[in-house]
Amino acid sequence: MSTAVIEANFDWTIVKVETAGGVTGYGEAFMGPGLPAVIAEYAGVLIGQDPTSIDRMLRRLYACSAPSAPGLVLHAVHGIECALLDAIGKEYKLPVWQILGGKYRDHVRIYADCHAGEALESLTPLLVPRRPQWVAAGPEQLSAVAPGAYAIRAREMAGRGFNILKFDVDVPTPHRADAHNRDLSSREIEQMDALVGAARDAVGPDIGLAIDCHWSYSTQAAINLARALERYNLMWLEDPTPPENIAALGTVQRNTAVPLATGENHYLRSDFERLIVEAGLRVLAPDVQKIGLWQGRKIADLADVHYVNLTLHNISGPIGTMAGVHLCAAIPNFLALEWHAASVPFFDDLVKGAKGPLIEDGRIAVPDTPGLGIELDEDVAYKYRKPGEKFF
């Protein structure tokens, strides 16, 4: 087992497993400081084991992680899990969606995470802004964004075939009164309303629109914002309050007609059960790499009992994105899978032998080929490797 890190808008950490039978599987792990070293710690547990006993192997890895879980160790475990599933599929000539129980759809709808403005947002695992080697000189920090920029970006991404767009509203603003109290002034809410309104006016009523808040606001501020945005018919309002207080999120949901979504900072089935039962959420937004494919299928089953849908958070490269495609194909209660890499020019180049872009007309075709259905082009990955990290 080995790893490589690609420096994109985020770190894309690729896990490679090689079996005694000569099968190579690829997976992708959610970023985290020191993640390759954490993944390497599990090699001694895996070497010599039968990878096809995937549920038993995962239980063993979870047990090894118990003193430190959840968080970074589960990033490592689920990156390994993805690579094992890819290898199992290749060994038995099955696509991963077949291992997960079969597929409900032949194409997976992708929603575009949109950024308006000139700066590329590239972040280290500690969420510190950086300039990757492949980015030319230009603005380093996001500056205050005008509604017109949201309109331009919305039209651009809708023109590329995406029928669901997501925008951030926790962006720099000249109206911020206090940077620490999680409050929102009426001027700030007016500014956010103008941004969302510009995007909605630009694409009309038939394009789905979602809004992300990145856990930024107090309970009352989130209620005020959600009520202000109700007229835009949002598909969901994402992460309005910090993730650890499920009761607070439930208070917000009970005081607005806008569906709230959260889950990318939750890991366990018990977390998602509480989000459904205690907070009353109708949309869950777990991260594909954080929950993993095997548990992701189980979380979807749990949600389906309550008639709750999933929209999958995803900031990964093509390996992690295709892993998400297999999970999304295999669950009935699926809304959309995120794509966060519109600003990364080499995204499709990382797919070995690609005959075209992975995403076409806002969708990804579900492959019938074994494993994940795509291979990493290691030569391209090496070109964009992160300085200072081992490469397989």
Image: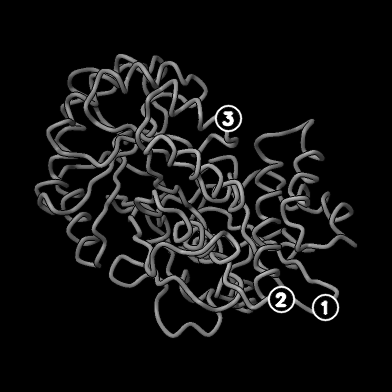
Q: Does 117 sit above or below residue 146?
A: below
Q: Does 128 sit above or below residue 342?
A: above
Looking at the picture, which amino acid does disc 1 mark? Answer: Gly
**Residue at image location 61% in from the left, 71% down from the top:** 371
Residue 370 horizontal side relative to residue 213, left or right? right
Q: Label 2: how many residues lie within 10 Å, few (<14), some (14-19) or many (20+)?
A: some
- For residue 160, which numbered disc appears in the image? none
- For residue 21, which numbered disc appears in the image? 1
Q: Secondary structure at mark 1?
A: loop
User: Are the residues at dot 1 and dot 2 in contact (C-beta closer than 8 Å)?
Assistant: yes
| Nearer-the-camera pick, 351 or 370 | 370
Residue 64 horizontal side relative to residue 343, left or right? right
User: Can you give x and y, in whole percent of width and height, for residue 154 in the image?
Assistant: 20, 54
Q: Spatial distance from mark 3 to mark 1, Cα to Cα?
A: 37 Å
Looking at the picture, which amino acid does disc 3 mark? Answer: Ser
**Residue at image location 34% in from the left, 38% down from the top:** 212
User: Can you give x and y, in whole percent of width and height, for residue 95 in the image?
Assistant: 57, 71
Lower sequence index among marks 3 and 2: 2
User: Can you give x and y, in whole percent of width and height, for residue 56 in the image?
Assistant: 77, 50
**Residue at image location 71% in from the left, 34% down from the top:** 69
Looking at the picture, which amino acid does disc 2 mark? Answer: Glu
User: Are the residues at dot 3 and dot 2 in contact (C-beta closer than 8 Å)?
Assistant: no
Q: Quadrant of residue 176?
A: top left
Q: Which residue is mark 2?
A: 91
Q: Does 180 sit above or below residue 159?
A: above
Lower sequence index among marks 3 and 1: 1
Q: Which residue is mark 3?
A: 270
| Nearer-the-camera pick, 389 or 215 | 215
Q: Label 3: how many residues lie within 10 Å, few (<14), some (14-19) or many (20+)?
A: few
Q: Spatial distance from mark 3 to mark 2, Cα to Cα?
A: 33 Å
> Which quarter of the image is occupied by the N terminus?
bottom right
Q: Spatial distance from mark 1 to mark 2, Cα to Cα?
A: 9 Å
